[in-house]
Image: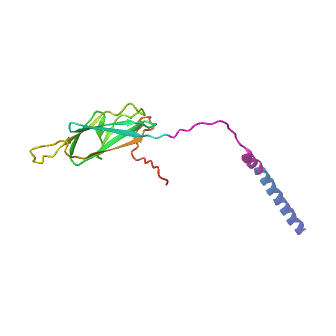
């Protein structure tokens, strides 16, 4: 009698296991057999923001404008390196953060024909004691400009992201 109870218990446990396993097989089979199809194509345009500085030197000043020739609106900033003293002037340009950059306040639209307003960098020549001064004798004024695509805050206002880094090199 003891032997039959063990067989019954084993058979009953096996049947319970088989029943439990068969209940979950249906949902698993449904998961693995569900699919969707689609047709057609959607073009994906991966554009870039590209800005081009324009510089002209007249009357002891460098006149700088920047044009957005890229695919997206952006913010721009300019930093000037010089071996002579310079002063700045320009509508819509401001210094922030004491970082040496001049920031163009409005968003620069992706329109090849509308540049920024002019940032004028006036060159102040050092007094060397020479009796004859040649204002075009020799000076270095290097302009570095940067741009960043417009990102929008939670409230929808456009903001620059100057910490975002783009790289064309493989990581």
User: Which sits in the foreground, 169 or 150?
Assistant: 169
Is residue 28 within the magenta segment? Answer: yes
Position of residue 153 measured from the top left corner of the image (x, y, whole percent): 44, 38
Look at 12% across and 46% down and name the residue there. 127
How many marks the image carries: the answer is 0
Give the magenta-colored segment's residue range.
25-46
Look at 37% across and 39% down and name the residue there. 52
User: Which sits in the foreground, 57 or 118?
Assistant: 57
Position of residue 133 measured from the top left corner of the image (x, y, whole percent): 13, 43
Look at 81% across and 53% down and name the residue there. 19
Q: In the image, 30: left or right of 86?
A: right
User: Which sits in the foreground, 29 or 76?
Assistant: 76
Is residue 144 within the magenta segment? Answer: no
Q: In the image, 68: left or right of 127?
A: right
Q: Quadrant of residue 59?
A: top left
Position of residue 82 measured from the top left corner of the image (x, y, whole percent): 24, 47
User: Which sits in the foreground, 65 or 74?
Assistant: 65
């Amino acid at each position: 009698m003891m032997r039959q109870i063990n067989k019954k218990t084993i058979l009953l446990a096996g049947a319970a296991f088989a029943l439990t396993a068969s209940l979950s097989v249906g949902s698993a089979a449904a998961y693995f057999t569900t699919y969707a199809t689609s047709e057609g194509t959607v073009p994906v345009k991966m554009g870039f923001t590209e800005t081009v500085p324009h510089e002209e030197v007249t009357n002891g000043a460098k006149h700088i404008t920047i044009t957005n020739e890229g695919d997206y609106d952006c913010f721009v900033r300019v930093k000037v390196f010089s071996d002579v003293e310079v002063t700045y002037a320009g509508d819509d340009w401001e210094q922030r953060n004491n970082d040496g950059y001049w920031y163009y306040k409005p968003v620069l639209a992706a329109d090849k024909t509308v540049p920024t307003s002019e940032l004028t960098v006036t060159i102040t020549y050092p007094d060397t004691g020479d009796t004859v001064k040649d204002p075009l004798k020799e000076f270095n004024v290097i302009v570095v400009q940067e741009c960043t695509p417009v990102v929008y805050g939670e409230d929808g206002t456009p903001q620059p992201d100057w910490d975002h880094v783009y790289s064309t090199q493989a990581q």
